[in-house]
Image (cartoon, grey):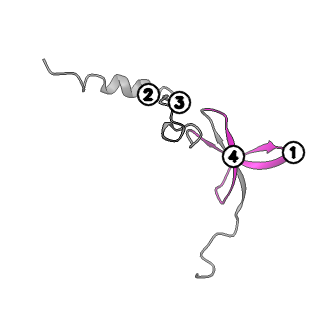
Amino acid sequence: MKKGIHPENYRQVVFKDMSNEEIFISRSTINAKETIEVDGVTYPLVKLEITSASHPFYTGKQTLVDTAGRVDKFMSRYAKRGQPKK
């Protein structure tokens, strides 16, 4: 391996799934503006819209996670495309 090309600032970071409030801790170099306290320890916080804890492929549940009305917006935009032409 080449020396000096890999980041040196690996640290523990909390990733939070905003659709179901699930959190997990992993090592990362990502920059975070917020922090969160978990079990008395303060970690950098990265908020995610969807993770393996809420994605239908991994959970086996076919539920729509609607963040900021995006699903409704998509449905209203493309609802007429699947209908037969008159």
**Count of marks placed on residues:** 4
The image quadrant that residue 4 belongs to is bottom right
Element at label 2: helix
- Nearer mark to the viewer, of 4 and 3: 4
- Please give the name of the residue rendered at 45% of the width and 29% of the height, measured from the top-left corner: 70
The amino acid pointed to by label 3 is Thr
Disc 3: CA contacts within 10 A as few (<14), some (14-19) or many (>=20):
few
Furthest residue to the right? 40
Q: CA distance from mark 2 to mark 3?
A: 8 Å
- Nearer mark to the viewer, of 1 and 4: 4
Is mark 4 in CB contact (under 8 Å) with mark 2?
no
- Mark sitting earlier along the chain (1/3): 1
The amino acid pointed to by label 4 is Phe
The amino acid pointed to by label 2 is Val
- Mark sitting earlier along the chain (2/1): 1
- Nearer mark to the viewer, of 1 and 3: 1
Magenta residues? 20-49
* Residue carrying label 3: 67
Residue 17: give x, y in percent of width and height.
62, 39
* Residue carrying label 4: 24
Is mark 4 in CB contact (under 8 Å) with mark 3?
no
Q: Which mark is residue 40?
A: 1
Residue 5: give x, y in percent of width and height.
59, 76
* Residue carrying label 2: 71
